[in-house]
Amino acid sequence: MTPPTPMRTDPCGELRADDIGREVAVCGWVARRREHGEHLAFVDVRDRTGIVQCVVDGAHDLRSEYVVRVVGTVRRRPEGTANPNLPTGEIELGPCEVEVLNVAEPPPFPIDERTEVDETIRLRHRYVDLRSERMQRNLRVRAEVNSAIRRSMERQGFTEVETPMLIASTPEGARDFVVPSRQSPGSFYALPQSPQLFKQLCMVGGVDRYYQIARCLRDEDLRADRQFEFMQLDAEASFVGQDEVLDFISDAVAEATEAVTGQRPADFPTMTWHEARERFGSDKPDVRFGMELVELTRLFAHTDFNAFKAPCVKGIRVPGEATTTRNRLDALTDQAKRWGAKGLVWMRVGDGLAIESPVAKFLDEAELSGLAAAMEAEPGDLLLLVADDLPTVCHVLGLLRLELGRPVVHEGGFHYLWVVDFPLFEALDEDGRPVPSHHPFTMPHPDDRARLERAEGEELLAIRAQSYDLVLNGWELGSGSVRIHRSDIQSRVFELLGISAEEAQLKFGFLLDAFRYGAPPHAGFAFGIDRLAALLAGEDNIREVIAFPKTQSGSDPLTSAPTPIPAAQLRELGLRLIE
């Protein structure tokens, strides 16, 4: 019996000079047709692997995006016609027989990426947009990231466990997406913001090392690095501390980076939260460029300039920008005020380190020369200074630093950084109670555990947590912590937060009940796969590595979601809309 003829023998983009002389069958979409004489035409056929040129006799009926099967012999292109920009540029197929598998209407936009297309139109016709080389590449990058993560976690002894998508609503910081229950009218499930509580239950259950590439959903405002639904590597391990978790995750991220780029990151340096804020004005510092914050408070401790009589004075040096126009400087000042500063002092550095500034007359020679020395100023530089409380100064200068110096996302390589020793509490509320920086199950730093018992008020803000973030080129990839597994420490944290035993049982009862039956010391982490894949693909928006994303307004142009549901379905769910 003769074996059936395959529809295609080779992908379009994988044919090379080594295949010359072979008869092949390729399938794909017509990317372009170029007439060559009265009957002959060059037809570029595209599939997910790339493009191959086919020489066709009588191709008048072929149109852009027709789905075709082409049978021909691989041959070398005539001398002088090779295309060095194509992997298949040395060869072509010919003579060819073409079978039209399906016709197509003209696409709503060109797929060759040489034309800028409105994003809403791209998303409305995402099935066409996905054919582009960019999207094909990005989805392959994402798949390689997932595959590499799984290899790493399994090699390190982790077990993949799937946790539920319909859960009870839990207080995790963002708004839940809720799902009405038809069988229990008036009651609702929530879609998980993360598998946090379930992975800790896995530790109580003796899973020991858990991981999951988990889908999470949060009803929060969208931006370049945030979608309603996103994917994250979620991991937890028993009988480990912070250092082991950092090693686990660093290996998984390094494996993913190597899978995409071919190069494994040499190391993942560590920086404390305090150092990150002092030097870069951010807890997710972009360390690809300089312009670090310079401490100037002591220099102006006895100044006569009232604007610098503040708890903190810092500045940044912008190399070579002394020629910045006054209009631009005024715009930067206005921006600094919108970010929370009372004002912004600018200074141009001239020849001999002479300082030109509207405030220079209020500063003495020692202050001006000390300023130039402290900031390592050179002629032609621009100096920007802010005076205020420490958090405001760091916040504003950190944003100005990014505004004026940050490279585009794909420049300067991939600089991973662990930020550790975050504060356990980030602020005090109006009642004087501390607000947790992460969640109320984060273990205090071992050196600060005793202070947890006696500290009050502002003293609480100095207590460090065993929590840690992974940062890449100024993007926070994810966060983790060592968890509280001891009831005495957990009770003290709840007491400080003003959470009574009854409220704790109501909010976290199923986790606290489980801890009564022997919870091991455990720690974990989660990072956004969308963010990692976007950066590795050289994209500055995670929508470009998601097959079917939402727009920044939260809508889906492809399916028109969100949409109303019929009145009959509302009645079945026991719901009524309030106008």
Image (cartoon, rainbow, N blue to C red):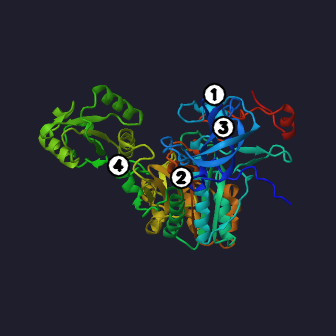
Circle 4 residues within 10 Å: few <14, some 14–19, many ≥20? few
Q: Amino acid at mark 2?
A: Leu
Q: Amino acid at mark 4?
A: Phe
* Residue hosting label 1: 38
* Residue hosting label 2: 532
Q: Closest to the observer: 28 or 569? A: 28
Across and down, in percent, residue 317 comes to 27, 43
In the rendered image, the quadrant that contains the N terminus is: bottom right
Circle 3 residues within 10 Å: few <14, some 14–19, many ≥20? many
Q: Which type of secondary structure does the marked residue at label 4 adopt?
A: loop
Query: Residue at point 36% right, 56% down?
Result: 275
In this view, 340 is above or below 158 = above
Q: Amino acid at mark 3?
A: Val
3 vs 4, front mark: 3
Q: Which type of secondary structure does the marked residue at label 1 adopt?
A: loop
- Mark 4 and mark 1: span between their CA atoms? 58 Å
Circle 1 residues within 10 Å: few <14, some 14–19, many ≥20? few
1 vs 3, front mark: 1
Q: Which of marks 2 and 4 precedes in the sequence?
A: 4
